[in-house]
Amino acid sequence: MNPTRIIIDTDPGVDDALTFLLALASPEIKLEALTTVRGNVTVEMATRNALSILEVANASHIPVAQGCSLPLVSELSVSGEAVHGQSGIGKATLPEPKSKVVAQHAIDSLIERIVAEPDEITLFTIGPMTNLALAIRKEPRIVSALKGLVIMGGAIRQGGNVTPLAEFNIHADPHAAHIVFHSGIPMTLIPLDVTYKCLLTSADVEQLNKIDSPIARFVSDATATYMDFYRRYEGFDGCALHDPLTLATIIAPELLTFEEHHVDVDISGGVSMGNTFADFMNVSKKPANMKVALDVRGREFVELFVERMESLCVRLSEAKHLPHHKRDSAVATDAPSHRPDAPSGE
Ligand code: BDR
Ligand code: CA
């Protein structure tokens, strides 16, 4: 089975960074590009972080296109600084990236890559959906050209993490989410209901750190501030793997329980602005517009995540000993799965 070809639209962000690493560690996935957006940090910082993280992972060949610096309509809401640290990546000191952002705007990059090869690319949005919403408005053919869309966002039965009713990515640009939800793209939602069940603990990070590797150190430094935040405000010793869980739709879909529903988002501007709600009783008689993950075998996902990080550490240290021109392609290709029952792709 060929790997699933993906683009990640992102606002790195600690758990965004962990998502890139998981994609690079997973043979079921071919990461083709990153596009950045304002969310956890400014779009300039998001772009810099994306380039640097790819460099840490020896994957600078993956293009990064910079996207929108402001939400469509809303005022700028809270940034993710308290959770992700001032740089966006916790206590990790990232190298000044040697590679450059591509000249094209993220919106055009998404349109060009997706429309050129209909039904080939699955898009993962793990930040506010400003870029995708504008891409839909600029080139509506992107809707039918996308193979699929997986969104980290929303809180369906669960409360919000920015307001009592709204989740960060949706709240940061609710109008963009509204455009996307009503677009007709075949989509899957990974809301807080499931991501809060995937907690990477300090014991997991310690286990990973038994390997002497820049990746293990990066995971530990990057998650330190994130974990402090969770300890202080949420009362547990760990942090949620919100964004990485989106990739379970490819690498371990059996861990997730999905239901199909009509899901909408409140853009009326009141206290529930950005609230995502499913029509569980089908009172609106509207057809389902997405698959929603409502349960997950969280601990199994976290263990899979740690295994994949371990294999990435090993692969990177092997790549170091290869001739220079072969190093980039040594990442994220032909890696054996560590799980005997791992699905071979979508
Ligand atoms: C989402 O908000 C961001 O802070 C995280 O990176 C994740 O995408 C979780 O609500
Ligand atoms: Ca994110």
Image (cartoon, rainbow, N blue to C red):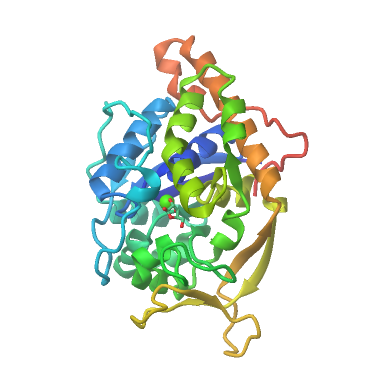
Q: Which residue is the extreme one toward the right?
A: 341
Residue 3 in sight from this viewpoint: no
Horizontal side of 181 relative to 41 (left or right) equals right
Residue plotted at (28% across, 29% down)? 97
Q: Position of residue 105 (x, y in %)?
A: 25, 51
Q: Position of residue 314 (x, y in %)?
A: 57, 19
Q: Nearer the viewer, residue 56 or 271?
A: 271
- Vertical placement of residue 314 versus 128, above or below: above
The quadrant of the rendering that contains the N terminus is top right
Q: Position of residue 213 (x, y in %)?
A: 50, 19
Residue plotted at (29% across, 63% down)? 77
Horizontal side of 176 relative to 219 (left or right) equals left
Q: Position of residue 318 (x, y in %)?
A: 54, 14
> Where on the picture, by quarter, is residue 59?
top left
Q: How many marks?
A: 0
Q: Nearer the viewer, residue 149 or 119?
A: 149
- Vertical placement of residue 147 versus 205, above or below: below
Residue plotted at (31% across, 45% down)? 46
Horizontal side of 127 relative to 337 (left or right) equals left
- Vertical placement of residue 300 versus 286, above or below: above
Q: Nearer the viewer, residue 345 or 37?
A: 37
Residue plotted at (47% across, 57% down)? 118
Residue 96 in sight from this viewpoint: yes
- Vertical placement of residue 141 versus 327, above or below: below
